[in-house]
């Protein structure tokens, strides 16, 4: 054992220790402190799939806003003389693509047809253009596709608002107070969740007129259950932490503890779950419209466009392609964006 007097007499000199490396101003450059949101933004930008999805979604939003505006037709305008015209796009038709040609299969074989030709002898075409073609009533598929996309984007916004306003508050309150309050709220949620959405929409159709209001109300009844369960689970995990007990000790109200202390610590997981709920809501609306329980004519959605074009799929398959591609892109990109947000906002993903 070293005597305390010996330790007291030990004095360190300036040259006893020296920095490793030439730069003595920084002790460690590998673990520079960063704010959470800055670090999450960097990880999100490095995710190519998430960035591609974000750009694609923004592009679809722009097309949904300006697509019907640049078209000379409206979504409900019918031109009987222009029925079942194949896609024709200026400039591209000079390259031999999207020039209005359509191959029809008959009992005697395949037949090439171009509905834009007004003089069969000279091959002269009219000055009419339908970028995505026209349907059996002569309506512009371009305008109707982007008008239907507006409905899907509206459903996406509604899904986010329902999750954040109803599901989030419901789950946080249920998990925070616990006991009888939690038991009653969870039993009520289980009863609501046990009723299929299709049954709820069908019953609403008997009371209300078919349309966006009915679908919105159906989502408000059942669309918040998943978010409430996740919010409740996060609350049960955090409400006994030291920082929550410290807030109680300082006299903070329950409202302040829930929304000022606990909510900021779980916002990343909630945002991720909200993004995952958007494709489900879009698919629900498309399915309801496909089976005839959604948007009524002449208004359209991607689901109703697919349902209508499905009747002519064997003879005019190009009519179903645009709404199918847009719907698939929206669902795929929102899922990939949710994956990117989960990887960026979850600190555990940083080491992977």
Image (cartoon, grey):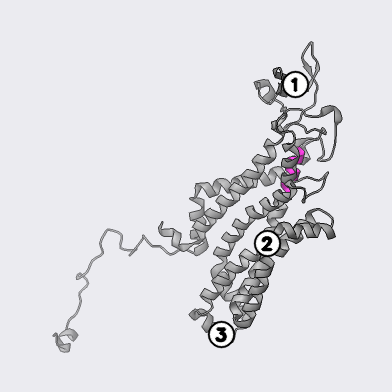
- Look at the image and tell me whether residue 66 can be seen: no
Please tell me the numbered disc located at residue 95: none
Q: Is residue 144 magenta?
A: yes
For residue 207, what is the image quadrant?
bottom right
Q: Going 70% across and 48% down the picture, which residue do you hit?
A: 286
Horizontal and vertical percent for residue 97? 66, 24
In the picture, the quarter occupied by the N terminus is bottom left
Q: Is residue 253 left or right of residue 73?
A: left
Dominant SS in magenta: helix
Q: The magenta stretch spans which residues?
A: 142-150
Q: Nearer the viewer, residue 285 or 163?
A: 285
Which residue carries the number 3 mark? 248
Mark 3: secondary structure = helix
Residue at 69% across / 60% down in the picture? 196
Q: Which residue is mark 1?
A: 114
Check disc 2 and report the residue beneath it. Answer: 223
Q: CA distance from mark 2 to mark 1?
A: 47 Å
Calculate the distance from the C-alpha at mark 1 to the C-alpha at mark 3. Answer: 76 Å
- Is residue 109 rendered to the left or right of residue 3? right
């Amino acid at each position: 054992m070293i005597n305390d007097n010996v330790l007291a007499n030990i004095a360190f000199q300036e040259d006893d220790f020296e920095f490793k490396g030439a730069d003595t101003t920084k002790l460690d450059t590998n673990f520079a402190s960063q704010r959470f949101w800055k670090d999450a933004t960097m990880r999100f930008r490095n995710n190519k799939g998430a960035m591609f999805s974000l750009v694609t979604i923004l592009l679809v939003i722009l097309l949904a806003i300006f697509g019907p505006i640049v078209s000379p037709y409206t979504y409900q305008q019918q031109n009987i003389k222009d029925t079942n015209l194949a896609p024709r796009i200026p400039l591209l038709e000079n390259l031999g693509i999207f020039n209005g040609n359509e191959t029809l299969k008959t009992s005697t074989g395949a037949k090439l047809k171009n509905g834009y030709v007004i003089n069969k002898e000279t091959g002269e075409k009219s000055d009419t253009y339908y970028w995505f073609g026209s349907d059996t009533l002569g309506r512009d598929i371009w305008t109707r596709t982007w008008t239907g996309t507006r409905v899907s984007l509206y459903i996406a916004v509604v899904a986010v608002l329902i999750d954040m306003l109803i599901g989030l508050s419901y789950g946080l309150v249920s998990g925070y107070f616990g006991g009888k309050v939690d038991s009653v709220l969870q039993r009520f949620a289980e009863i609501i969740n046990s009723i299929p959405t299709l049954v709820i929409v069908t019953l609403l159709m008997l009371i209300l007129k078919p349309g966006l209001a009915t679908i919105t109300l159906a989502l408000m009844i059942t669309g918040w259950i998943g978010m409430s369960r996740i919010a409740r689970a996060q609350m049960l995990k955090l409400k006994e932490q030291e920082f929550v007990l410290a807030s109680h000790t300082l006299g903070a109200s329950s409202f302040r503890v829930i929304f000022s202390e606990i909510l900021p610590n779980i916002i990343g997981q909630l945002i991720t779950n909200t993004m995952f709920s958007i494709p489900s809501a879009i698919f629900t609306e498309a399915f309801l419209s496909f089976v005839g329980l959604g948007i009524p004519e002449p208004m359209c959605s991607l689901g109703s466009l697919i349902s209508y074009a499905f009747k002519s799929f064997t003879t005019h398959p190009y009519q179903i392609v645009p709404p199918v591609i847009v719907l698939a892109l929206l669902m795929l990109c929102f899922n990939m964006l949710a994956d990117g947000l989960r990887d960026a906002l979850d600190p555990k993903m940083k080491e992977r």
